[in-house]
Image (cartoon, rainbow, N blue to C red):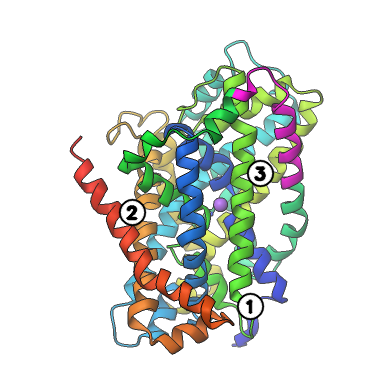
């Protein structure tokens, strides 16, 4: 079979697809909800520090493994480290990717449902019970959210089955700037509301006493990595479809900066509104699904803005979901040897079935809880805060301690020796130290 069947068409195609993977519900749904739960500005500062100090270097690390490995999550490690157990890192990523997409598709289904409600006009004005109550009732329904989740996964399947050059790349050229502009516009509106300043204070005025809370670090780390799509080998898989020199460092920085801009804009759009409308910052996963319609209902022409926003949000979620599905599909195709078509159907079905549990956890299975988390909250917590950081740690060990330094250097495509040395110290020492410290601190804190 033609080896080049799965290759990015253009150099920029890879960059756009990687940005598409990064920017998604992680920025617009997850970032506000965890920031709200962890108290705002202090969390944001730690999150930003993690993104720039270790997140972007780890993104480059993951790119470098995929590019050099030239195969899927498991196969790339087998290529670079034959007859070792390193490929279990990739296997863990495949499982992690499946778990993430199982709940990601639930939330994406909610977004599609909102889009539908804006197209039909049903959500143009606030219902008497309030958006929060109406949404709470809808997600508790045992059937409807599942249909929207299935629709979303169907769209994801439709793209992935056609292969990676079938168009994942192109949509992002319009999507990214469109979404950024619309969110800046919405943030601008929200800032004119009474009480908006409270929201800005919440987001930008740190309370340093919170730095003694170990959970804040774990959650910030998990959010930074989740948002950058690292740790589960999704970015590794995308980079494996590269052949020639592609300036990986520039791609990692571009993706990291872009992703972070989206998260910060989402914060500036959501928190002032939360405070101004008297909503609950600690609402958890439903936070933005209560806040956004409240913004649109109060906004001149909010109905039209709402339609456009949910179109863009659904597309951003889709380009991330495509990368999450491509990860296991690539494994079943290239390491297990299935056809792309069979692999795509198989993975989609597994993901949908698992996702049913996350969805029902808001309704008939709401009694299934772990601490104060329902099923979605638990899978989200475990994947973002443990599976992803552990995967990223193993990849740092792999490049920092298993590969030769010269090989690491070549794979990283970093030109300057000084820059390479900084990056190498981060991957070899700083990442392991920070990640291990955070996990240990949280283990000690568990009993509280
Ligand atoms: N980074 C994506 C987002 O923010 C989610 C994602 C995580 C995608 C891990 C791929 C791998 O929405
Ligand atoms: Na993201």
Q: Kindly identify which numbered label has been placed on residue 376.
A: none
Marks 3 and 2, how far apart in space?
A: 27 Å
Mark linked to residue 386: 2
Name the mark nearer the viewer: 2 or 1.
1
Q: Indicate yes or no whether the magenta region holds residue 180.
A: yes
Residue 118 spot, x, y in % from top left:
72, 30
**Residue at 59% of width from left, 45% of height from top?**
263
Query: Judging from the image, what secondary structure is the residue with disc 3 in?
Result: helix
Task: Please give the range of residues in magenta.
Answer: 179-197
Residue name at image x 49 percent, y 26 percent = 281
The answer to whether 313 appears left or right of 68 in the picture is right
Quadrant in the picture for the N terminus: bottom right
Res. 416 in view: yes
Q: Which residue is mark 1?
A: 247
Numbered disc 2: secondary structure: helix
| The one of 204 and 153 positioned closer to us in this rendering | 204
Q: Which mark is residue 313?
A: 3
Instruction: Compare marks 1 and 3 and give the one earlier in the sequence.
Output: 1
């Amino acid at each position: 079979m033609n080896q080049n069947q799965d290759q990015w068409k253009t150099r920029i195609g890879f960059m756009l697809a990687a940005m598409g993977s990064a920017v998604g519900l992680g920025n617009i749904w997850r970032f506000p909800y965890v920031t709200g739960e962890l108290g705002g500005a202090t969390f944001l500062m730690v999150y930003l520090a993690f993104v720039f100090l270790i997140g972007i270097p780890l993104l480059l690390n993951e790119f470098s493994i995929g590019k050099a490995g030239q195969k899927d999550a498991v196969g790339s490690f087998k290529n670079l480290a034959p007859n070792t157990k390193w490929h279990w890192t990739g296997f863990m990523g495949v499982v992690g990717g499946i778990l993430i997409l199982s709940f990601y598709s639930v939330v994406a289904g909610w977004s599609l449902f909102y889009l539908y409600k804006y197209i039909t006009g049903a959500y143009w004005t606030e219902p008497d019970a309030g958006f929060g109550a109406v949404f709470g009732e809808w997600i508790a329904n045992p059937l409807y959210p599942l249909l929207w989740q299935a629709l979303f996964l169907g769209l994801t399947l439709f793209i992935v089955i056609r292969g990676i050059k079938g168009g994942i790349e192109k949509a992002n050229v319009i999507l990214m700037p469109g979404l950024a502009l619309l969110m800046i516009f919405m943030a601008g509106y929200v800032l004119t509301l009474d009480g908006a300043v409270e929201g800005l204070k919440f987001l930008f005025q740190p309370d340093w006493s919170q730095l003694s809370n170990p959970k804040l670090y774990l959650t910030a780390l998990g959010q930074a990595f989740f948002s950058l799509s690292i740790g589960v080998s999704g970015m590794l898989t995308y980079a494996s479809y590269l052949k020639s020199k592609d300036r990986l460092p520039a791609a990692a920085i571009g993706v990291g900066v872009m992703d972070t801009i989206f998260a910060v804009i989402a914060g500036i759009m959501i928190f002032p509104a939360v405070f101004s409308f008297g909503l609950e910052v600690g609402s958890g996963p439903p936070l933005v699904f209560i806040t956004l319609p409240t913004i649109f209902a109060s906004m001149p022409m909010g109905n039209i803005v709402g339609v456009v926003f949910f179109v863009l949000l659904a597309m951003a979620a889709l380009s991330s979901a495509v990368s999450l599905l491509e990860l296991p599909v690539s494994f079943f195709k290239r390491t297990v040897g299935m056809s792309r078509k069979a692999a795509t159907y198989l993975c989609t079905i597994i993901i949908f079935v698992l996702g049913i549990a996350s969805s029902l956890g808001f309704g008939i299975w709401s009694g299934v809880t772990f601490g104060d988390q329902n099923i979605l909250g638990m899978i989200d917590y475990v994947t973002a805060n443990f599976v992803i950081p552990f995967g990223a740690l193993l990849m740092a060990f792999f490049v920092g301690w298993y590969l030769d330094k010269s090989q690491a250097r070549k794979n990283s495509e970093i030109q300057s020796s000084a820059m390479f040395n900084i990056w190498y110290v981060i991957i070899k020492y700083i990442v392991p130290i920070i990640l291990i410290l955070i996990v240990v601190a949280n283990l000690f804190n568990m009993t509280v």
